[in-house]
Amino acid sequence: MTLLLPASALAQDGPTLDSLKSELDTTWVMVAACLVFFMQAGFAFLEIGLSRGKNAGMGIAKILINFSIGSLLWWAVGFGFAFGGDHTIIGSSGFFIGNGTDVAGTPADSAELGFFAFQLMFACVSLAIVWGSTLERIKFGVYIIFGAVFVGLIYPLVAHAAWSGSGILSRVGGGVQDFAGSSVVHLTGATAAFAALVFLGPRKGKFGPDGRPRAIPGHSMPLLGLGVLILWLGWFGFNGGSTLGTSGNSFAEVIAVTNMGAIGGVIGATFLIYMLSRKLDVGMMGNGAIAGLVAITAPAGYVEMWAAPIIGLVGGLVVVAGVLAIEKKLDDPVGALSAHGLAGIWGTLSCGLFTSDRLAESLGVGKAGLFYGGGLEQLGVQAVAVLVTFFGVFILSAITFGIIKATIGMRVSEEEEDAGLDIAEHGMYGYPEQFIPAPELIGVGSPRPQSGVAAPVGSTTEVTA
């Protein structure tokens, strides 16, 4: 009997089922957060692959500074504005979380900090989307200023509206259905990118004298493909982690649905670009995968498996048609307006068509979609969310970019654009041996002369048609 006492005491003092469940939920959320963080590498490779060689290195600097600025502002105010309090427009508590208080004004525990970290990754993904459309001609300082405003205010307003439980979009009908952010994350980022393009203008040589667009090919399709595959992997954490726990193993179903959406996007984009050009365009196929993933992000927790490839396929069709149409007027090097914007709109609206009654009831948000006998009500709620997100983000982004342009300016000089941002802004080529003769490579990276920007050896301003 005496020998049993320590074991009995240990059993009484040991972890409870509730504490083990909480620890398991937090572990999954943190694993998912790490997967979403890895998406930053995906964005870097995708954008570098679609840039010219003289602008390859700056993509790394951009990703590093944006994630750093985003993290700082999310900790300081963004998280509190997004999830603090029960106000309709904006949160009011949870600032500087970890320094004494959480969103409820009480000491933050590990689960709360896990949610903070997971949502930080979403905010920084949305910010990363903004800059793909601005490659090769924007000043580095713009990243810092707009990044602070975007993560500190613009994105939190949208997140609060849809996801806080008290925001305006959760009060429309039975609430907007946006499981992991087709609208909150992707449409928000793409809309800010659109505002940036309005103030920034196209790259030099993008449009000919007749106004017709000319191709400016990226330097590495393998890097593009690597970026797409990394993003695809990260999306399993993006959507799967949005269950915020492991109960019922629903995260596994969400991940399976997510993958089906992605493959639908690839198939749709491949089919349409081949029918239009008789070529299997690698960039379009990659954007098809992204568009399928973006489209399935809102409905990932609301739709049955059969609907996922259909939603993704339509996303793939939309991205090809969108890229070809938008290119006639705007210079979007990576197709972000289509892959994240148009596909994000479609994904948000698709909930109003495909949401199953089973999953709508399980999640307790909104109603079944049209194809499950729910009528048009949920489709109307989804449309309201799209309109509120687009116009709200565009207005705030346009004001911010307008101020930036009127003060420090938005784009580099023509000489710096010709030379490439690697050497013009960072003093080092991404591929130095490609631009500098071998005998001159010694000493590369030393401060460059202040008299001007040296054009790369063998550089040209011609654009491949």
Image (spheres, rainbow, N blue to C red):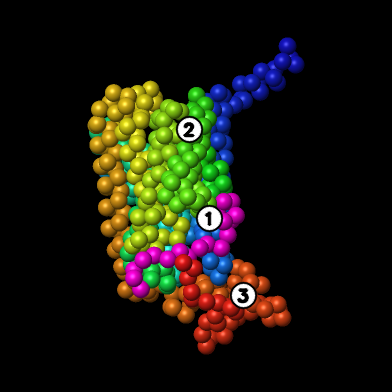
Residue 384 to residue 99: above or below = above
Specify the amino acid type for callout 1. Leu
Q: CA distance from mark 3 to mark 1?
A: 22 Å
Say what secondary structure mark 3 lies in: helix
Residue 288 to residue 430: above or below = above
Q: Which residue position is annotated with label 2?
A: 257
Q: Position of residue 256 (x, y in %)?
A: 51, 32
Q: Position of residue 308 (x, y in %)?
A: 44, 33
State the residue at coordinates (29%, 38%): 382
Quarter occupied by residue 154: bottom left
**Label 3 crowd bin: few (<14), some (14–19), many (20+), radius 10 Å:** some
Quarter occupied by residue 403: bottom left
State the residue at coordinates (46%, 57%): 334
Q: Which residue position is annotated with label 3?
A: 435
Can residue 289 be found in the magenta stretch? no
Q: Is residue 191 visible?
A: yes
**Label 2 crowd bin: few (<14), some (14–19), many (20+), radius 10 Å:** many
For marks 2 and 3, the one nearer the N-term is 2
For marks 1 and 2, the one nearer the N-term is 1
Say what secondary structure mark 2 lies in: helix
Q: Position of residue 267 (x, y in %)?
A: 48, 40
State the residue at coordinates (53%, 44%): 232
Q: Which mark is residue 179?
A: none
From the viewer's perspective, is the residue at label 2 or at label 3 nearer?
3
For marks 3 and 1, the one nearer the N-term is 1
Can residue 216 be found in the magenta stretch? yes
Q: Give the magenta-colored segment's residue range.
A: 209-226
- Where's the N terminus, which quadrant? top right
State the residue at coordinates (42%, 72%): 205
Q: Nearer the viewer, residue 414 or 159?
A: 414
Q: Which mark is residue 46?
A: 1
